[in-house]
Amino acid sequence: MHVSRYKQWEVLPASKFSGQWFKFAVGNELLESFIIGTKYTDEDLMEYEKQGYQIIDIPLEMLHRFEMDMNRTLIDTCGIAVQSSYKYIPYKLVQPCVGLGSNPFQKEILKIGLKDQYQIKDFFIPELVPEIIYTKKIYIHCDLSKSGDMTGISAVAVLGYKNQERFDDTGESNTLKEIVFRHVFSVGLQCPPNDELSMIKVKDFLHYLKFELGWNIVGVSCDGYQSLMLLQSLKIDGFDAKEISMDIVSTKTKECVGYTIFRNTLVEQRIKLLNLYELTREITNLEKNEATGKVDHPKQVTKVLEDGTKVKSVGKDISDSLGGAIYNATVSVDLNELDYLDGVTITDNNVLLNNSSNLADQFFGISTNPVDGSIRMLPQNSNDIDEQLNVDIQKEIKRTQGILQQVKSANPKTRLSDQQILDLYGEMDTDGFVIF
């Protein structure tokens, strides 16, 4: 018996396709496959073949599917499997989404546990998150641990939706509503030696954001590990809290559901990320096992530091927390309640940052027409706006640090937190200070 495997476009009617093609370089266990595209020379193709790549032509209508997940699509449409495990989100997908915004946490990784006196909010600078962001729908995900692993916490803001064109297996075009996000923060919590994570401190930080700072937190999620008590407590306190796992794989498609949503968001550039080293390292080291569909970190090794702290090689705790926040928002938000980012005013023209007209709007990827109020999305690489806002933010940080230093010098015995000092300072004149 002879069995032939045809490429999908070879058996579908030619009328389904435009007749335009792009080149694709098929690799092997040692060479990573990649999209060549439509701009190339004969010399380029000869060089790729010399390196060991197989060059194939694919209908242009399928380009988006290959951009989404080239290895999975290569199997589904061509019957070609070249790697059992591969890097799931390469840096070239992350880089276009990265802006120059500042993380409101002083450090990417905090060493904090059950036994010390620190609170998570002690390392948080709320002034770095504009009101136009924290008043949007905020989703937070906690990837919990006990002692050995790191705990990741991330927040995203839902700005609105955009119309996203996609092609199905038959080459038909479909336009879908997809959410546009802004990355608000990410942080890793590393337990000190012989200590463990304090769930109470995680809960207190969420309370601080919602009840003290007034953030519009509409959803909190945790992975399944030891999260039951925390979720129940948050529900009692008025949070919409649920369990979300980034490890669930669809038995039908062998796709990791949460990470497929996360990856699509990056591919379609529907999120602006903070430029965080540890987060980027975790995302770009994720591997997908094609046999099981699971997305995971590479095999880990543990290193013991001089102070006894156990540090594992690259994991996916912070990556899970960001992906979990996006996943929860995607399955929870009613798209009919969101603003369409090409036709309505979604921010107030009076909302300014350091007297820079609409700078905050532009930094977060939108520009308002002062005549008709319509808004449009800006390119993700608006670096001039990023840099200008970053300068304003750094000035505000220095001003705040100066106030704290001045007050603490005059009142060395104060027990008030930095935020309490700033709150009181805002209510006083600048001619003098009170003793706390």
Image: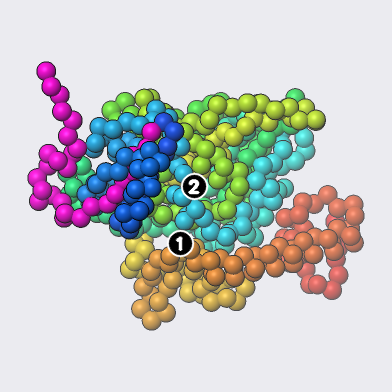
Image quarter (top left, top right, bottom left or bottom right) of the C terminus: bottom right
Q: Measured along the vertical axis of the image, is residue 420 above or below residue 395?
A: above
Observer able to see residue 176: no
In the picture provided, is 223 more to the left or to the right than 24? right
Image quarter (top left, top right, bottom left or bottom right) of the N terminus: top left
Toward the top, the furthest residue is 1
In the picture provided, is 44 more to the left or to the right than 241? left
Coordinates of residue 356 in the picture (x, y in percent) = 57, 75
Q: Crowdedness of circle 2 by 10 Å Cα count: few (<14), some, many (20+)? A: some
Coordinates of residue 90 in the picture (x, y in percent) = 46, 44
**What's the residue type where badge 1 is placed?**
Gln
Residue pointed to by mark 1: 380
Secondary element type, mark 2: helix
Coordinates of residue 422 in the picture (x, y in percent) = 74, 60
Q: Crowdedness of circle 1 by 10 Å Cα count: few (<14), some, many (20+)? A: some
At x 67%, y 55%, the residue is 125
Q: Tag 1 or tag 2, which sits nearer the N-term?
A: 2
Q: Quadrant of residue 41?
A: bottom left
Secondary element type, mark 1: loop
Camera-nearest residue between 357 and 389: 389
**What's the residue type where badge 2 is placed?**
Tyr
Mark carried by residue 5: none
Q: Which residues are magenta?
A: 1-28
Q: Is residue 56 magenta?
A: no
Residue pointed to by mark 2: 91
Camera-nearest residue between 343 and 210: 343
Q: Measured along the vertical axis of the image, is residue 281 above or below residue 308?
A: below
Camera-nearest residue between 61 and 406: 61
At x 64%, y 60%, the residue is 127
Q: Nearer the viewer, mark 2 or mark 1?
A: 2
At x 47%, y 71%, the residue is 348
